[in-house]
Amino acid sequence: MNDSTPGARLPAEAVALLEALLAADTPDCRTLRAQIPQLRVTGGCPCPCPSLDFAVERPEAVPTTSVGTRIVAEATVLDADGQPIGGAMVFTTEGRLSSLEVYSWDDPPITRLPFPDRLQP
């Protein structure tokens, strides 16, 4: 599960997942990782998926990237047997982290944030 209560800090599972998805040693990924401690939940998906929307609490305290508004990282989510079951994507809006989407390709839906070791680039 996730805590999609508006204003809540990101759950530890979301922090770990964002850090794994943004692990590349590039200027944009380093800048986006620096935003993670400033993120607060603004909402979640109404379906059973664990997707989260968030915003930087103090935008003036963190730099933005030049990536604008787009998907900045994505990976395939694997089940316990190593089989692909869905995906995870990180979105930015105006150079700031804005959402983490986790989705499944079939039933049953993914209802918990996956562990970073369940990601395949």
Image: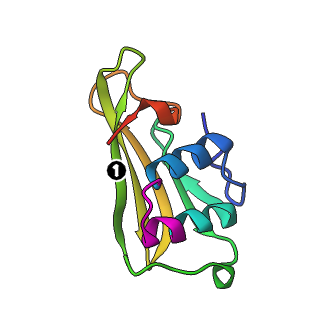
Amino acid type shown at disc 1: Glu
x, y (%) of residue 10? 66, 52
In the displayed structure, would residue 74 be above or below residue 42? above
In the displayed structure, would residue 74 be above or below residue 26? above
Q: Quadrant of residue 80?
A: top left
Query: Residue furthest toward the front?
Result: 25
**Considering the numbered disc 1 on the image, is that residue within a helix, a strand or a loop?**
strand
x, y (%) of residue 61? 69, 81
x, y (%) of residue 12? 67, 43
Q: Nearer the viewer, residue 20 or 10?
A: 20
Residue sitting at 51 percent across and 40 percent down?
Answer: 50
In the displayed structure, would residue 55 be above or below residue 102? below
Q: Is residue 27 magenta?
A: yes
x, y (%) of residue 83? 30, 21
Q: Which residue is mark 1?
A: 74
Tally of numbered discs: 1
Q: Which residues are magenta?
A: 23-31
Residue sitting at 45 percent across and 39 percent down?
Answer: 47
